[in-house]
Amino acid sequence: MDKFQTFTGIVAGVDRANIDTDALIPKEHLKSIKRTGFGAALFSDWRYNEDGTDNPDFVLNKPETKAAEILVTRNNCGCGSSREHAVWAVVQYGFKAIISPRQEDQPGFADIFNNNCSKNGLLTIELSDMQVDEIFQTLEKEPGVKATVDLENQKVMLHASAGDQVYAFEANAAVRDKLLKGLDDIALTLQYEADITAFERERAV
């Protein structure tokens, strides 16, 4: 897994709550036994017409946001089934971070989806309802606006024409460390290889 680095990218917003994993990648795209090639299936029911042509009204088909790297949604993103393919599709499309609002009774992201994101180098960022509202308002006025995501300092800077809109966020410390170091679960375990080997040697006696 690559180290997560500060980057600046185009922001695209899908203004819906409870986007489930079947919306992120419908079940008919889960037949492959490989872990690649899922980017084209992201949001396929919304992104394509019945004849397979692009739906011009969907945000990822618009020229200003087709190359987006930051996705903004409403709360409870990634609910539904536990399919990891949903995260693969988001990452393989080209997104590096997702922003959603946390409410008192509703998380920004469903738990399993959130965990799958951290395992695949995709940063999930929770902001307040008011902050996400402000971002969507900016996206409406300025399609194609860019933002800088800085995980080291835990902030997002939306580069609006009226000036930068800066949003601080708090990432899980363990996830933040893992992403910054580019460690997947196996690499994380291998950091303790000497201790594991010593333990096994002692148990074998």
Image: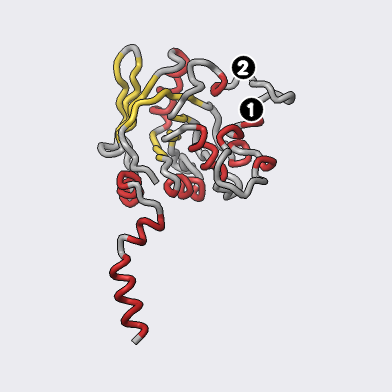
Q: Nearer the viewer, residue 59 or 76?
A: 59
The spot of residue 112 in percent (x, y) is 51, 50
> What residue is shown with label 2?
56
Query: From what the image shows, is residue 45 above or below residue 22?
Result: above
Q: Nearer the viewer, residue 159 or 127?
A: 159
Q: Which residue is drawn at 49% across and 25% down?
A: 13
- For disc 2, the neighbor class at 10 Å (few under 14, some 14 to 19, many from 20) is few
The spot of residue 155 in percent (x, y) is 30, 33
Amino acid bearing label 1: Trp
Q: Which residue is drawn at 51% across and 36% down?
A: 92
Element on which disc 2 rests: loop
> What residue is shown with label 1?
46
Query: From what the image shows, is residue 144 above or below residue 87?
Result: above
Residue furthest left as drawn:
153
On the image, which quarter does residue 3 sit in? top left
Quarter of the image where the C terminus is located: bottom left
Q: Which residue is drawn at 44% across and 29% down?
A: 69
The spot of residue 59 in percent (x, y) is 55, 21
Amino acid bearing label 2: Pro
Mark number displayed over residue 98: none
For the residues labelled 2 and 1, say whether their Cβ atoms are less than 8 Å apart: no
Element on which disc 1 rests: helix
The reply, left or right, for residue 153 in relation to residue 161 is left
The spot of residue 152 in percent (x, y) is 27, 39
- For disc 1, the neighbor class at 10 Å (few under 14, some 14 to 19, many from 20) is some
On the image, which quarter does residue 160 sit in? top left
Q: Residue at x 41, y 56 (%)?
A: 185
Task: Tell me the CA gap for discs 2 and 1.
Answer: 10 Å
